[in-house]
């Protein structure tokens, strides 16, 4: 240690730029040397090994600090959003789409992918044909241009706060069943070849729903407006159906009365009564069809009531979904920390079950009251602790995907061998191809 400490400390200091952090990295490298010493082939390789070990340890430390600062910043911005986000959004909402439309094609595409579709930076980079870091820089530049656009129009917001507000409010949930209605109408138009005329008729028929969607402000408010208007529509339909039913009952009574009179009638008046009877029979046939329509509409009303009840219980705002993802990601990260400590004391092997590492879980996490449990996660890797590509090897994953965000993507939380966790989304809910590239099966597993 005396012979090589200056080498290790200097390399660490150049990477982190902070003397105290460099001391911690130096200590970690020599602890690692104490464990690895029997595996070194000869003493001539020691300085080279120390250089490489210090460089890798410092790089991991820097990445960890970057993630920690990012999480702290997100937590801070979330707190700011909770206090004043609604007021900020009310100022931004009328200008947001115009601001996004003023961006260049690449910047606009980055903003739409990141905030309107809820994609992570890896997916944004893949769509733009650039790396994840380049995608992050492009999104940051685009956010800054949006901030400048809004500032010229009297809306003051920091770049970080603006990103959080847009994430929480840019996309709202469309009414349940709207997609099925639109697709059915489009297919019907294509099949009949009625072209623009059918489209105009359909637009007229759905004008109320379209106006409701366009007028929705955000999240739960949209859901409540839709539910209230749906209930009003149901009440109006019930009133019309009841009037039709009463009219049918009156006409049927009149029909029976005239039929009895006709049976007893003699003389010239019989012909007039016969004509009246025939007219009533025609009206009765029409009302019979209306009765069938009445039954169909009543069934539709019942379905709409059930749909509204389900919608009230199931719809969550983007902010609520983001909070759930963040809580699950933190939960996975805490277990990963326990796994890594366990591995250091058990031949550098990750545990095969949660019980083995439970004693290493921080007390605050172990005693926390939460609805997130280990039953919702599974361990998919329990091989060696030391991996050159640990940031790309899944150790822990959520068992069941969850429906997310207004666009309907499914997401799962994953924990990786280097200690970080992240939420990954798939539009079709098929994670197999993505996981296959990141799940490693060691020789002893």
Image (spheres, rainbow, N blue to C red):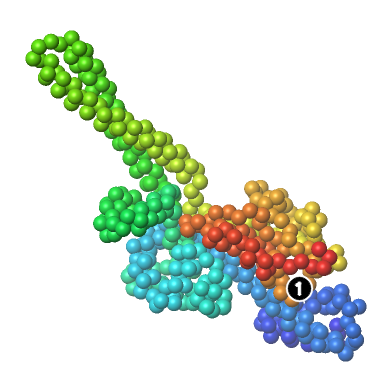
Residue 67 sits in quarter? bottom right
Q: Residue furthest left?
A: 268
From this view, report whether residue 430 is shown above or below residue 67: above
Q: Is residue 7 left or right of residue 172?
A: right
Q: Is residue 144 visible?
A: no
**Closer to the camera in the image, 207 or 200:** 200
Q: Residue at x 65, y 72 (%)?
A: 65
Q: Is residue 101 left or right of residue 5?
A: left
Q: Identify the residue position indicated by label 1 in the image.
A: 387
Q: List x then y, in percent, for residue 82.
A: 49, 56
Residue 41 sits in quarter? bottom right
Q: Residue at x 53, y 61 (%)?
A: 427
From this view, report whether residue 71 is shown above or below residue 28: above
Looking at the rendered image, the quarter that the N terminus falls into is bottom right
Quick one: label 1, few (<14), some, or many (20+) residues within 10 Å?
Answer: few
Task: Count the marks.
Answer: 1
Q: Residue at x 25, y 26 (%)?
A: 284
Q: Residue at x 29, y 32 (%)?
A: 290
**Closer to the camera in the image, 358 or 121:** 121
Q: List x then y, in percent, for residue 434.
A: 63, 66
Q: List x then y, in percent, for residue 6.
A: 79, 87
* Element marked by disc 1: loop
From this view, report whether residue 443 is shown above or below residue 21: above
Looking at the rendered image, the quarter that the C terminus falls into is bottom right
Q: Is residue 267 visible?
A: yes
**Closer to the camera in the image, 262 or 162:** 262
Q: List x then y, in percent, for residue 179.
A: 42, 53
């Amino acid at each position: 240690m005396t012979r090589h400490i200056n080498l290790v400390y200097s390399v660490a200091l150049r990477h982190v730029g902070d003397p105290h952090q460099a001391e911690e990295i130096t200590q970690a490298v020599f602890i690692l040397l104490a464990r690895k010493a029997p595996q070194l082939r000869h003493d001539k390789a020691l300085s080279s090994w120390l250089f490489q070990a210090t460089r890798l340890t410092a790089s991991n430390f820097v990445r960890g600090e970057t993630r920690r600062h990012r999480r702290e910043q997100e937590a801070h911005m979330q707190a700011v959003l909770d206090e004043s986000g609604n007021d900020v959004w009310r100022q931004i909402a009328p200008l947001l789409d115009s601001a996004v439309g003023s961006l260049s094609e690449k910047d606009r595409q980055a903003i739409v992918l990141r905030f309107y579709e809820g994609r992570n930076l890896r997916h944004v980079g893949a769509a733009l044909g650039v790396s994840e870091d380049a995608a992050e820089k492009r999104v940051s530049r685009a956010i800054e241009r949006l901030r400048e656009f809004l500032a010229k129009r009297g809306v003051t917001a920091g770049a970080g706060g603006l990103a959080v507000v847009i994430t929480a409010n840019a996309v709202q949930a469309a009414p349940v069943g709207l997609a099925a209605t639109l697709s059915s109408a489009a297919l019907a138009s294509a099949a009949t070849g009625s072209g623009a005329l059918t489209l105009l008729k359909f637009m007229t028929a759905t004008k109320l729903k379209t106006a409701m969607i366009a007028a929705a402000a955000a999240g739960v408010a949209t859901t409540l407006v839709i539910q209230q208007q749906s209930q009003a529509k149901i009440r109006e339909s019930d009133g019309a159906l009841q009037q039709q039913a009463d009219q049918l009952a009156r006409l049927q009574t009149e029909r029976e009365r005239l039929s009895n009179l006709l049976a007893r009638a003699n003389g010239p008046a019989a012909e007039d009564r016969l004509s009246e009877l025939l007219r009533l029979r025609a009206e009765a046939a029409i009302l019979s069809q209306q009765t069938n329509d009445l039954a169909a509409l009543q069934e539709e009303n019942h379905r709409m009531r059930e749909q509204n009840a389900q919608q009230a219980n199931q719809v969550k705002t983007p902010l609520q979904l983001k909070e759930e993802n963040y809580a699950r990601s933190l939960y996975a990260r805490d277990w990963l920390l326990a796994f890594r400590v366990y591995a250091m004391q058990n031949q550098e092997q990750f545990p095969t079950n949660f019980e083995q590492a439970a004693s290493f879980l921080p007390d605050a996490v172990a005693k926390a009251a939460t609805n997130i449990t280990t039953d919702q996660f599974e361990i998919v890797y329990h091989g060696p602790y030391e991996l050159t590509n640990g940031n790309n090897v899944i150790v822990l994953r959520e068992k069941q995907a969850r429906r997310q965000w207004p666009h309907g993507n499914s997401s799962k939380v994953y924990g990786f061998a280097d200690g970080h966790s992240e939420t990954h989304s798939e539009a079709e809910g098929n994670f197999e191809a993505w996981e296959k590239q990141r799940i490693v099966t060691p020789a002893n597993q």
